[in-house]
Image (cartoon, rainbow, N blue to C red):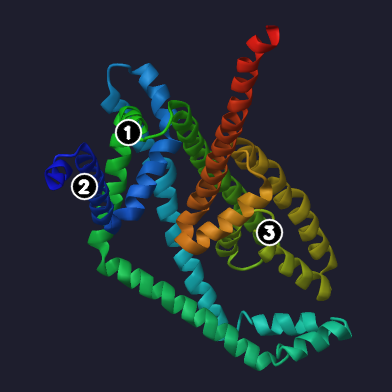
Amino acid sequence: MKFKNFVTSPVLEHNAFLALLVAVSVAFVWILLPFGGAVFWGAVIAIVFRPVYAQLRQRWPRWPTASALATLSLIVLIVVLPLALLTGMLVKEGAALYQRVQSGETDFARYFEQVVAVSPDWLHSLLQHFGLTDFKELQARISAAIGRGSEAIATQVYSAGQNALDMVVGFCVMLYLAFFLLRDGAALSDRIRDSVPLAPDHRRHLAAKFITVIRATVKGNVLVAATQGALGGLAFWFFGIKGALLWAVVMGFLSLLPAIGAGLIWLPVAIYFLVTGAVWQGVVLILYGVLVIGLIDNVLRPLLVGKDTQMPDYLVLISTIGGMAVFGITGFVIGPVIAAMFMAVWDLFATARQAALAAPAAVTTDEAAPGDQG
């Protein structure tokens, strides 16, 4: 009799349905893993360019498909094509740098030796302690490191050529998904939000937080990185430093790290200028780096990222570095999103807990009032 009650129990049906729900969800994520990057960036592109699509819909209210196609064309023109051209130029600059190092035209060890020669005794002793004063060995290490880097780049290029079909498919999946998310994203997000077993206010708050953080992180970090990289590359070109485009891209990439970013490149160059007698170049580069390049980070990033995400700068820095360490380049988006959702969920929990603790006191007061009146 007990077994009959068990197999006909609503609890069993409920648990079986939850197990099936988890199983099919895990299976769905599993089949998406080969194109995880394409799916992620397709969703990010749709979220970032959603306001552009909304403006086009206002102009063409009866043609949502045409609005989505126009938005997608704009994305290709202002994002995809410039990135493709920049990648090609970057590969060319990297190959040229490798050739200069191999031929001895660019000798990083000699530059380092010139800096050490004018360094104070305590710094020279410290460098000697770590074995950094053997310049021939240092040059060999640098050449080997650049050689390994060039070999890794060549391997990636060769692998990209071998897996060109996978890259094309992934790229098409990204654009295809972005198109449908632009056109049908509002209805899809409403269905997903309604399916989440949370209170309506909590669902709306978390969904708005998620979208806001992604837009602020992508637009803010990309704009700051592009601006700082361009300004740094312009300064290097002005001072005649070879490979200015390569160093501009490196500074732009490092600018994804708040506060410390581009200074890791321009500051050593400025110090080298100072210790080798090019005083005015070093002073100008330091002033330019602090007052122009640094000002971009100190002004634009808080306005574009911190203000919208409502996260302190130190949390943005830690979550960005941690995200990139775990997820790679996509981590500069995923890390701050996880941090923002962490803060939002715990804020909702704290608010709900305070309300729950305050409720019994209010009930007790209301119940005691009639007796007091009697």
Quarter of the image where one finds residue 17 = top left
Residue 13 or 299: which is nearer the viewer?
13
In the rendered image, residue 324, in percent from the top left (x then y), is placed at 51, 60
Residue 21 point in image, percent of width and height: 24, 45
Residue 102 visible to the viewer: no
Disc 2 secondary structure class:
helix
**Residue type for callout 1:** Ser
Looking at the rendered structure, the secondary structure element under dot 1 is helix
- Residue type pointed to by label 3: Ile
According to the image, label 3 marks what residue? Answer: 260
In the image, 259 versus 155, the foreground residue is: 259
- Is 296 above or below relative to 59? below
Residue 26 horizontal/vertical position (percent): 27, 53
Which residue corresponds to the image point at 44% horizontal and 49% vertical from the top-left?
82
- Indicate which disc, 3 or 1, sits on the residue closer to the N terminus: 1
Q: Amino acid at mark 2?
A: Leu
Residue 343: x and y, percent?
A: 57, 43
Within 10 angstroms of label 3, few (less than 14), some, or many (20 or more) residues?
few
Q: In the drawing, does residue 156 fall left or right of residue 298?
A: left
Could you tell me which residue is drawn at 71 percent across and 42 percent down? 299
CB atoms of marks 2 and 3 within 8 Å: no
Q: Secondary structure at mark 3?
A: loop
Residue denoted by label 1: 195
| Foreground: disc 2 or disc 3 | 2
Q: CA distance from mark 1 to mark 2?
A: 16 Å
Residue, disc 2: 20
